[in-house]
Image (cartoon, rainbow, N blue to C red):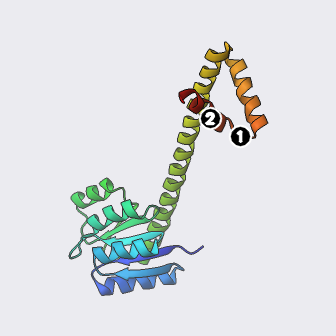
Amino acid sequence: MTSRIAIVDDEPITRLDIKEFLTDAGYSVVGEAGDGFDGVELCRREKPDLVILDIKMPLLDGMQAARTIRREVPGCAILLLTAYSSQEYISKGVDLTVEGYLVKPVKESSLVPMIEIAIAKMKETKRLKEEKNQLEIKLEERKLIDRAKGLLMKQYDLDEPGAYKQLRSLSMNKRCNLAEIAKILLGADNG
């Protein structure tokens, strides 16, 4: 699948050069913008895999636009582009957790590898977030099941294996997973 990229830079010549590099390399350029406001709107609308953002732009600069895009377009990798290589700008990029930082003038030989790394990094971050969410759900389910076991142990004077066996039996008979059975039992106990 071709990666979808947005270009946001106030210099039309720079946008044109980058677009040419990208299309020659087989990427799909989903849009261009000349300032941060239009860049944010472009990313909201197109949801690109990656946005290349110039730092210094009128109205809304690249740092402010990156902050908004990060919040509103999850899964979009951000590559900052600038003529400035000072530590101050690099630190701001690190604070924004962008996926890459390139100094102008941009060369195709450095742009393409940076894009590939940035997109791979974003995919890995997305995968880790999804894994974290799944683990949090499983932990909450485990807590429910443990509370339901405790309730059964107390109500029926069961040991832990006996309470778990009863939960499993209910789960199989009612064709519900253990967490659903636990919610029902705990809800019935609170009502």
Which residue in the protein does label 1 denote?
A: 176
- The type of residue carrying mark 2 is Ile
In the rendered structure, which amino acid carries the disc numbered 1? Cys
Q: Quadrant of the N terminus?
A: bottom right
Q: Is residue 175 above or below residue 160?
A: below
Evaluate if marks 2 and 1 touch, with contact meaning CB atoms under 8 Å apart: yes
In the rendered view, does 85 fall on the left or right side of 108?
A: left
Give the vertical position of 25 relative to 114 (above or below). Answer: below
176 lies left or right of 148: right
| SS of the residue under disc 1 | loop
Residue depicted at x 29% and y 74%: 37
Work out whether residue 105 can be spotted.
no
Q: Residue under circle 2? A: 184
User: For this view, does 12 lie left or right of residue 27?
Assistant: left
Q: Taking 29 as reference, is 94 above or below it?
A: above
Q: Secondary structure at mark 2?
A: helix
Residue sitting nearer the eye, 38 or 177: 177
* Residue 158, picture quadrant: top right
